[in-house]
Amino acid sequence: MDFNVSDEILGTFVPILVYWVYSGIYIPLGSFENYRLHSKKDEDEKNLVSKWTVVKGVLLQQTVQAVVAILLFTVTGNDSDASAVQQPSLVLLRQFVIAMLVLDTWQYFMHRYMHHNKFLYRHIHSQHHRLVVPYSFGALYNHPAEGLLLDTIGGALSFLLSGMSPRMSILFFSFATIKTVDDHCGLWLPGNLFHFFFRNNSAYHDIHHQLFGTKYNYSQPFFVMWDRILGTYMPYSLEKRAGGGLEAKPAKDCKDQ
């Protein structure tokens, strides 16, 4: 019996599955205190929302994302999947990079605006910052309106403007999901390739979640170019934390700002 699943269905649901599988890997790794950016005690005491509430919030956002993805694939329906496979590697790479840049640009400016607009921060974006100590499966814990504006619409724009196929979107959105989870994992693990290839990483984003860094490091999820260009870049240093583990601290030249 031949059972085929369309690229559109895979592009909708594979990134959701990847989110829970990859974030689940980090749960046992969180027991390695020496690699944590915050202690387990701080994670339990400083966060302002329960983990069960976080799970429900993420599932709600992923439901909205799935509905929008299905609508988007329906409207832009393309049955020539075979042609997508035959595209030159340079074309696929170009689409991937364009999608990264589009997503980064959209998220930077929307994210920054949500911090500067007091109404939007108080009623929408502050929900994400209830996680003072980020952890993996809280990466997509947002107000539903923020999830729609930042992640879902940003993803739709990156898909449309890059010209990628539904098949290519499976790879791109799975990669973007893994990167987003990694940035929120709260760990600095040796050998993590994301730390080698991307300046925007778990320590960089951890700075943004702290009180002193909420007006800095808006860039997500790939590059730090907009922070550098527009003066919101806060470099950090990793230092050993009293009691074990690590701590991301702003570089010395930023402490007096």
Image (spheres, rainbow, N blue to C red):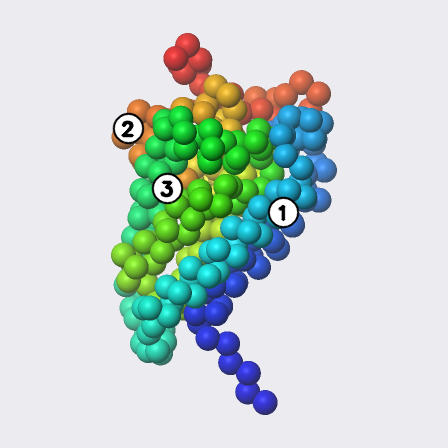
From the viewer's perspective, tell me whether residue 30 is left or right of residue 158: right
Badge nearest the viewer, 1 or 3: 1
Q: Which mark is residue 55?
A: 1
Does residue 68 lie above or below 85 as drawn? above
Of 146 and 171, nearer the camera is 146
Q: CA distance from mark 2 to mark 3?
A: 14 Å
Choose top left, top right, bottom left or bottom right for residue 28.
Answer: top right
Q: Is residue 7 visible?
A: yes
Q: Secondary structure at mark 1?
A: helix
Q: Nearer the viewer, mark 2 or mark 3?
A: 3
Q: Residue at x 54, y 42 (%)?
A: 141
- Residue 30 image point, x, y percent: 68, 39
Q: Nearer the viewer, mark 1 or mark 2?
A: 1
Q: Which residue is farthest top?
A: 256
Q: Quadrant of the C terminus?
A: top left
Q: Residues within 10 Å of mark 2 (few under 14, many from 20)?
A: few
The kind of residue on which mark 3 rests is: Gln
Q: Which residue is mark 3?
A: 107
Q: Name the amino acid type tagged 2.
A: Leu
- The circle on residue 230 is 2
Q: Earlier in the sequence, mark 1 or mark 2?
A: 1
- Mark 1 → mark 2, Cα distance in angstroms: 34 Å
Secondary element at tag 2:
helix
Q: Are marks 1 and 3 in contact (CB under 8 Å)?
A: no
User: Residue drawn at (31%, 24%), measured in percent from left and top?
Assistant: 231
User: Considering depth in this image, is 192 or 202 the residue closer to the camera?
Assistant: 202
Where is residue 204? Give x, y as percent.
47, 31
Q: Which amino acid, by three-letter code, is at mark 1? A: Val
Q: Quadrant of the N terminus?
A: bottom right
